[in-house]
Image: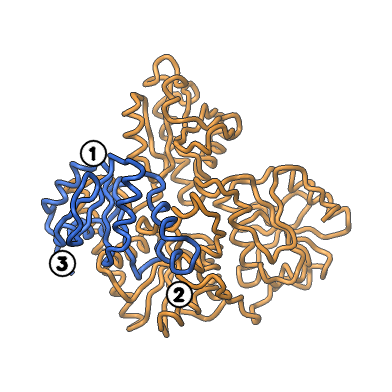
Amino acid sequence: MSELAYKPEIIFQLENLLKTKRVIVYACEQPKYLHLFGKELKERRYDGVELWHSIDRVPDDEILKKKTQQQVDEVLEMYRLYDFSDRIMVIDESDQYGTLFNYVTNGLLSDVEMVEAYLTDL
Amino acid sequence: MEKKLYAEMIRNVDDLSNEMNLASKRIFLFGHCNATLELADFLDSRGFKTTAILDNSASKQGINYKGADVVYPQDIMRMAGKDPSTDSVVLITSRFYASMLIQLRDIGYKGIVRKVIDYNTYAEYSLTEETILRMKKRERRGNELLAALSNKYPGQFKLFCPLNALGDIYFMSSYWKSFAEKRGIEKAVFCVTGKALADVIRLFDDYPVEVYEQKELDSMIQSAIYTKDKNCFIAHQDRPYVVNLGKALYSKKIPLDQIYCCGVFGLPADTKPETPRKDLPEYIGLSDIPEGRAVIFSPYAKSVVAIPDKVWEEAVVYFSGKGFKCYTNVIGDEKPLVGTEAVSPSIVEMRSVVERAGTFVGIRSGLCDILRESRAKKIALYPDYNYCDTKWKAIDMYHIDQFEYNLSVTEEIEWEKL
């Protein structure tokens, strides 16, 4: 387990950003759903949200923001330490608990419905 | 609401009442949920009137609870009196206290805003050095507890049940074997927050179970999340904060047992749940219960809105009139309904009592799940409330197919027709 530095630079940035925006961190390995999330957010015309990820060859725009793997890891490490803001959401496929991806796997939700569910209270 | 949390709520309200003349204030509660309604009931019992319940949800607007309408938070500015900062107070039971406070201040509300319960040890909406260090310390404590657990059960998988709720534990237990088979788990230890929960797990098998204080278990779960411990699983549908399954309910009705099967455990929708084992101990006073001519009432549930006394009174009168001996299932200082005798079987003995009696009438709670497979006439009464902040009613989410009757208590119950 890595020792978390008190407050990495990205956390300072995040703290400031969260005053005016919500941040979604896409932490899945597969890029498949990143595009769906980006598309859904753009269609809803959210200007108060940023979607952070570390996937290569996905261009930045007003919503999608590419971060380095280290930056994403540092944010996720803080997120796993405690629930530090209700304005951040992490999308992941953890083995440690149930996720909305399970509903897609067993047919209760479509891909789009799952994305919509994640974005419900934005 | 759990007793400890309820006691904390009472203490905080009494402290506030000692600080100011609460009776002279317009009282607003923020967040329409079960805990808020329990707070409203408590305030009412103390002679304090709730002016309104603030909620951002459009679907909640217009709901009235004991004279208090649900309104949008911005409505507080027209309802809080000539000088809101002195004429009113806002009380919050929700974990979203910090964001609710920010919203109220953004609206321009300058009155007192007080959190009356600290539900949630996982959340602190702050990134100060002091907060981060305190949370690191909490995680380390959790890690020590995890190490001790691993020493006691070397190599065993750890299953965490974060919430003190009988029904959730029942569903978790009923799908556990299928999940363990899917993951190739041979041995596991279950971690819960109360003996009754351990008993629910043991309805199914003699699994090893460890009981922790809530805050201890929370810190263990947090540490498991932080260290990405692969040898564990958190078996709950909305705790802790990393679990987002509840978001599906804003658009889709997924009953609670299906949430556990498909959402929590990721099993196919047609997975058959296990049922409790046959060889459960019997209640010691069983022979005193007239076989097939008794009714077991269960009117109390800590986390459910109460059903009006009148409903129970009429039920007791009806069944007594038909010659049934009536009992009330009670724990601790709960009182039996008038006209009934108290009976207090343990979780594992409960089935024997209900099967002996022949009839069970209970508020829809986790106890009803434990009795799903009991051979008796079973009637579940559902208070009229929505599941969390969704549009689904309790009866939609908690309906039990194995019960003969699932009745929403919105109109008079015609007992003679059942």
Badge 1 element: loop
Q: Which residue is rendered at x = 78% and y = 67% of the image?
A: B358
Determine the chain carrying the residue at label 3.
A
Instruction: Find disc 1 in the rendering and name its residue.
Output: A19
User: Rounded to the nearest whole Å, what is the CA distance between mark 2 and mark 3?
Assistant: 31 Å
Q: Is residue B289 above or below residue A17?
A: below
B274 versus B354 height, above or below? below
Q: Mark 1: which amino acid?
A: Lys
Q: Quadrant of residue B140?
A: bottom left
Q: Which chain is blue?
A: A
What's the chain of the residue with tag 1?
A
- Nearest to the eye among marks 2 and 3: give it: 3
Tell me, for residue A2, which label it has, or none.
3
**What is the count of numbered marks?**
3
Q: At x 45% / y 75%, what residue is drawn?
A: B209
Q: Amino acid at mark 3?
A: Ser
| Quarter of the image with the N terminus of chain A in it | bottom left
Nearer to us in this view, B383 or A49: A49
Q: Is residue B101 left or right of residue B328?
A: left
Residue A53 at x, y percent in the picture? 22, 57
Using a 10 Å C-alpha cutoff, classify the residue at mark 1 as few (fewer than 14 neighbours), some (14 to 19) or many (20 or more): few
Drawing shade for chain B = orange
Q: Which residue is mark 2?
A: B209
Q: Amino acid at mark 2?
A: Val
